[in-house]
Image (cartoon, rainbow, N blue to C red):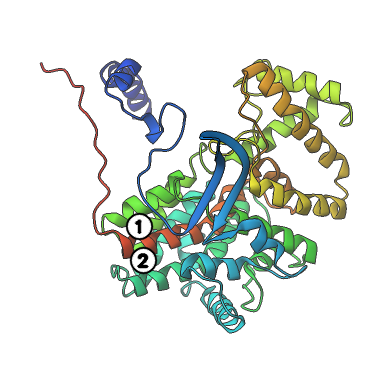
Amino acid sequence: MMERMNKYVNDREVVCRKNDSISPRLYEEYGVNLGLRDEKGNGVLTGLTNISKIVSSKIVDGKKVPCDGELWYRGYRVETLINNLGEEEMGFEKIAYLLLMGELPSKEEEKEFSKIIGECRTLPTNFTRDVIMKAPSEDIMNSMTRSILTLASYDENAKDTSVSNSLRQCIQLISEFPLLAVYGYNAYNHYEKQASMFIHHPDPKLSTAENLLMLMRPDQKYTAVEAKVLDTALILHMEHGGGNNSTFTTRVVTSSGSDTYSTIAAAMSSLKGPKHGGANIKVMEMMSDIRAHVKDYSDKEEIAAYLSKLLEKEAFDRKGLIYGMGHAVYSLSDPRERVFKQYVEELAREKGRDKDLLLYENIEELAPELIAEKRHIFKGVSPNVDFYSGFVYDMLGIPQELYTAMFAVARIVGWSAHRIEELICADKIIRPAYMSVMEKR
C-alpha cells in the first residue's frame, strides 16, 4: 500500500508544481510583499505592541543608517535587566513577570510569582506515564505539542478565553514546559536509544534554569556558573519584537478566539520549523564540519580558507552560508550575542573548552569580512545569538534533540505576553488578503 501511495504522490507532485507555480513577476506587478517583507527586507507593519522593541537603525541627517542592535523589554534594555541581576541571581522568573504584567515586580511580588511558578511546575497524575511515555519521539517539539493539547483535557475551563483565565493558563504552561521538554527527551532516550531512564521531580524552590539542569542529569548536580549561563540564555530568548513567525502565529490564532492550548500549540508548530527555531542546530553541525577540516584553531589563514569554501558552496551543505552570521533585522550587532558572550567565555573556562572558544572567536572575527567581500554586503554582518547558544548547550550537556525545545521553554513567556495583549487590545480576527491570479477555464 505504501509503495503505491508513494508512487501516486510522486506522480501528482508534478501536477501540483505545474498548477501551483506563480511567476515572481506577478508579485512585483501587484506590489505584493512576499513573506510580509518589503523590497528592502523590512517587515510589513501589521500591528502595535507595548511588549518589546528591536532597534537596528537610526535616522542621521534624515537618512536611515545601521546602528548597534538594541532589544527592549517593556521599556528596559535587555542588557540593563541582566546586568542589574546579582552575580548568582536567577532572573528568568523576574523578567517573565515583567513581560507578562508590563512592570518589574517588587520583592514581594517577585517572591509570590516565583512561588506560584514553582507550585505549578507539576503535571496531572500519571500524565508522564500515560501521555509522554506512550508515544516517545525524536522530535521533542512534536512530543511537547501533543502534551500541550492533551493538557487541555485536564482543564475544566480550557475554552474560557477571558484575560484572567488565559493568564492562569499561560503561567501554568510556563511552569510546565521544562517538564514537557525534559521528560519527552528522557522517554525518547530510553525507548528509542535504549538508554537508562530517570524521571526526577522538580524542586519548587529552584529557578527554571536550575530545575532544567537538575531534571536533565542523572545525579541532579549543577554548578552556579552553569545555572547562571542557562538562566541568561532563557532571558535572551524570551521575546523578540513581536514580528517573528511564532509570535505572529500566536497573535493570529488568538485573534480567531481560540483557546490558550491551541494557540500555544500553533506557536510551537511554527517555532519547530528549521527557518525559525533550529538555527543553533545548524551552527553546531557546521562547527563539527569545520573542526573536521581545520587542524589549527589559532591559524586564521587556515580558518579563513575553509570559511571561503563554505561561501563558495564547496563545503559542508553547499548552501553558501556561514550559519550564525547575520540576522534578518540586526546588521552591526545582535545585542543578545553581545550580552551572552561574557557568559559563554566564563562557562568555557569552567569546562576547559578554551580551544573551542578560540575557534568560535576567530570565526566571529573572520566571517563578517569574508561575507562582505564575497557577497558585497556592506550594511554589516555580525554573529547572532544562535552562533553561541548551541555551543553553550553543548557545554551544559544538553542533547541536540532538546535545542529547539530550550528555545520554546524561554519563548513561551513572550508568546503568553502577546496572547494577553491581543486579547486586551484587539477584537478583530487577523485576516490578510491574497489576490487571486487564477486563470479562468
Q: What residue sits right under mark 1 in the picture?
A: 262
- Alpha-carbon span between mark 2 and mark 1: 9 Å
Identify the mark nearer the N-term, 2 or 1.
2
Image quadrant where residue 316 sits: top right
**Where on the picture, by quarter, is residue 45?**
top left
Q: Most extreme residue toward the left, as rendered?
A: 441
Q: Which residue is drawn at the image coordinates 32% and 65% (left, top)?
A: 424
Label 1 crowd (10 A; few <14 / some 14-19 / many >=20)? some
* Residue 23 seen in the current view: yes
- Kind of residue at badge 1: Ser
Q: Is residue 370 above or below residue 287?
A: above
Identify residue type, mark 2.
Ala
Q: Quadrant of the N terminus?
A: top left
According to the picture, the residue beneath numbered tag 2 turns out to be: 152
**Nearer to me, 106 or 144:** 106
**View extreme (front): residue:** 61
Question: Which residue corresponds to the image point at 73% horizontal and 63% vertical from the top-left?
Answer: 228
User: Looking at the image, which is closer to me, 122 or 276?
Assistant: 276
Residue 398, given in percent of the width and then of the height, sits at: 69, 52
User: In the structure shown, which secondary structural element does the residue marked by tag 2 occupy?
Assistant: helix
Is disc 1 placed on a helix, strand or loop?
A: helix
